[in-house]
Image: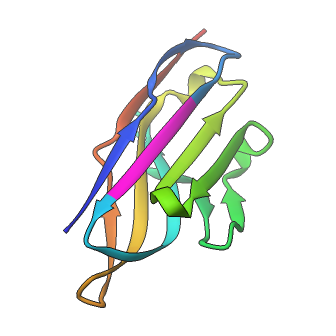
Amino acid sequence: QVQLVESGGGLVQAGGSLRLSCVASGSIIRIDTMNWYRQAPGKQRELVASIGRAGGTNYVDSVKGRFTISRDNAKNTVYLQMNSLKPEDTAVYYCKTAVLSTDWRNYDYWGQGTQVTVSS
């Protein structure tokens, strides 16, 4: 079993910054793609950013130039640095990771979510 623990959410004014972290622990051989998703009230969950094991990244257009995803493979941790935050970034943010587990099977795991609220 693998656990994901997120942290770093909170309330911030528009234009401010937050840094989210997600730490994976448990029966892990290797973590492949790591992702951040978000879900705003009344909206579908959307993929915000992804990072491969080698560091290649992708972002949804709405956050390009403002958010940066990074990872520390030694710590099984993914980060999301969010700058120039806007009220429309308000959502619950979730990390999702693709894990090669100790049973040599691949699984996707989700974190519990962390609330980000941006006031205008």
Check residue 80 for magenta coloring: no
Residue found at the far left of this picture: 1
Residue found at the far right of this picture: 65
Q: Residue at x 37, y 34 (%)?
A: 114
Q: Locate residue 116, reporting x and y percent.
A: 46, 27
Check residue 21 for magenta coloring: yes
The answer to whether residue 29 is above or below residue 19 is below
Can residue 41 be seen?
A: no
Q: Residue at x 65, y 14 (%)?
A: 14
Does residue 70 appear left or right of residue 4 in this picture?
Answer: right
Q: Which residue is nearer to you in this view: 54 or 45?
A: 54
Main SS class of the magenta portion in the image = strand
In the rendered image, which quarter contains the N terminus?
A: bottom left
* Quadrant in which residue 118 is drawn: top right
Q: Which residues are magenta?
A: 19-24
Q: How many marks?
A: 0
In the rendered image, which quarter contains the C terminus?
A: top right
Residue found at the far front of this picture: 74
Can residue 15 be seen?
A: yes
Q: Locate residue 57, reporting x and y percent.
A: 70, 62
The answer to whether residue 11 is above or below residue 104 is above
The answer to whether residue 10 is above or below residue 68 is above
Does residue 70 appear left or right of residue 30 in this picture?
Answer: right
Does residue 43 appear left or right of residue 47 in this picture?
Answer: left
In this picture the colour scheme is rainbow
Q: Residue at x 50, y 27 (%)?
A: 90
Q: Residue at x 64, y 23 (%)?
A: 17
Q: Which residue is nearer to you in this view: 76 or 88?
A: 76
* Quadrant in which residue 3 is drawn: bottom left
Q: Locate residue 9, reporting x and y percent.
A: 44, 27
Q: Which residue is nearer to you in this view: 46 or 66?
A: 66
